[in-house]
Image (spheres, rainbow, N blue to C red):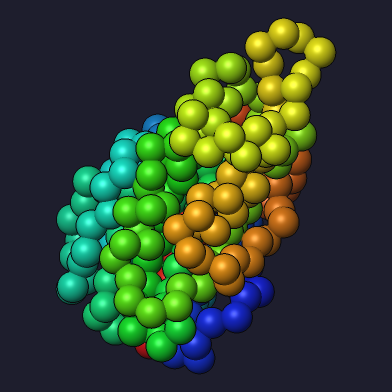
Amino acid sequence: MIIPDWQHPQNIQAVFSTRQRGISTGKYQSLNLGMHVGDLPEHVAENRQRIIASAQMPSAPVWMNQTHSTRVLEIDYPTPDVVEADGIFTRTPGVVCAVMTADCLPILMTNASGTEVAAVHAGWRGLANGILEEAVACFSGEIMVWLGPAIGKTAFEVGDDVVSAFTRVDPMAEQAFEPRQQAGKWFADLVQLAHQRLNRAGVKQVFSSGLCTYSDAHNFFSFRRDGVTGRQASFIWIK
């Protein structure tokens, strides 16, 4: 596990899983937490139990079926049901919010009083369409945010369509893109794009892991790097 390094209230707990110390094999080796990627369900179930025990979670996490939407769902009790959303928000202590990733940006959020938390899945589509703004709107008071490991700015190649999706909302977003030699191709910085969106939404306390999933095959799954692969996850809850 990685324990996020950020300023947050003492009653808030957050962890990020690496791909180490699980039982999955082959392309999913080893702590794959994704049930939807083709791994053996019994392996994923055991992996999930291991991270629950290691992190001393108060309940099983609430998992999402993530579709790059802008839907943030409020959950007020632990549920085994997979919810249709790309963000989970709660005010209830003991509800563990989870977000799975394999290059997209996992985002954990809390308010300064430690009474509200959220876990958000942010690929470029979600960021461009306003998933962070939807999440921020759920909160009261000052917000603190942790941006977890995601594909780095020297590995995430995109086209003109992605650039225009951001710059038509905020011309300053072009600063997060670096042109490549091939016309119409850019390197995109997901972390910078998230920073820009959060700052525009009034969030000033933003912390980043600085870790790249694509370049670290030992610790992280990466869809861009491997295609068929597992998923790591970020978790946050109110103690």
Task: In this rendered view, identify the residue nearer to me: 136 or 101.
Answer: 136
Residue at the location (59% across, 44% down)? 193
- Left or right, residue 40 beside residue 175: left
Q: Quadrant of the N terminus?
A: bottom right
Measured as percent of width and height from the top left, residue 176 is found at: 67, 38
Q: Quadrant of residue 223?
A: top right
- Farthest right residue in view: 181
Measured as percent of width and height from the top left, residue 90 is found at: 27, 71
Measured as percent of width and height from the top left, residue 121 is found at: 43, 49
- Left or right, residue 202 beside residue 237: right
- Left or right, residue 212 beside residue 163: right
Compared with 154, 144 (above or below) is below
Q: Quadrant of the C terminus?
A: bottom left
Residue at the location (52% across, 18% down)? 161
User: How many numbered marks, from 0 up?
Assistant: 0
- Farthest bottom residue in view: 10
| Residue 157 visible in image | yes
Task: In this rendered view, identify the residue nearer to me: 18 or 125.
Answer: 125
Compared with 5, 10 (above or below) is below
